[in-house]
Amino acid sequence: MSQQDDPNDYWPKAYLAIVSRLNTSLSILASATIIFLIYRSQAKLSIIYHRIVLCMSIADILASLAMGLTTLPMPKEMPFEVELGYDWPGPRYGNTWTCNAQGFIWVFAGTIGFGLNAMLCLYYACAVAIQMKESNIRKYIQPFIFCFPLSMG
């Protein structure tokens, strides 16, 4: 009996696909709520903190969407799939281009999210530890805050 014929092997893989889609849906919902709360606030995007968190939420939505699609963008037939023993559960409707696009969006948005998290720490270091004024942070630090994560991505 081959690995593909084992009925006990399918459920753990199917479980991973279901859990991944559930977790990414919750992440997208939470990030959308953060964006909604930022736009409902009186300050909106006039505060640097709100701009950083908004960009982090957008990056999280993109990365979560790419992760939540799981097998959908994968090519219907992949070379060497059977020979290498891979058996991906779930429907596959894509081609090589959609699979590459999913991977690019996931890596790009995830890297930008990590970079923005680091820049949020830099913002707090300047605002709290150094006690810089918001106008000085906006003038000297803000261009670096948004250029660094984009260059990392």
Image (cartoon, helix red, strand yellow):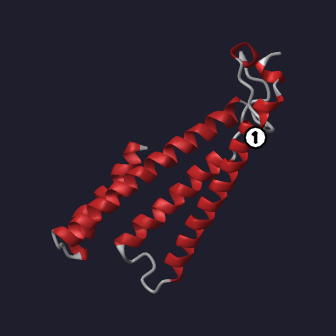
The reply, left or right, for residue 142 in relation to residue 83 is: left
Q: For the residue carrying disc 1, how many other residues have a C-alpha within 10 Å: few (<14), some (14-19), or many (20+)?
A: some
Q: Quadrant of the N terminus?
A: top right
Query: Which residue ends up furthest to the left in the rendered image?
Result: 130
Q: Nearer the viewer, residue 118 or 16?
A: 16
| Total count of labels | 1
Q: Residue at x 25, y 75 (%)?
A: 134
Q: Is residue 147 above or below residue 5?
A: below
Q: State the image quarter where residue 9 is shown.
A: top right
Q: Nearer the viewer, residue 22 or 33?
A: 22
Look at label 1 and name its amino acid: Ala
Q: Position of residue 2 (x, y in %)?
A: 80, 16
The reply, left or right, for residue 65 in relation to residue 124 is: right
Query: Which residue ends up furthest to the bottom in the rendered image?
Result: 42
The reply, left or right, for residue 85 in relation to residue 4 is: left
Q: Which residue is mark 1?
A: 14
Q: Residue at x 66, y 58 (%)?
A: 25
Q: Position of residue 147 (x, y in %)?
A: 35, 53
Q: Residue at x 30, y 60 (%)?
A: 121
Q: Position of residue 151 (x, y in %)?
A: 37, 45
Disc 1 on helix, strand or loop?
helix
Q: State the image quarter where residue 33 is shown.
A: bottom right
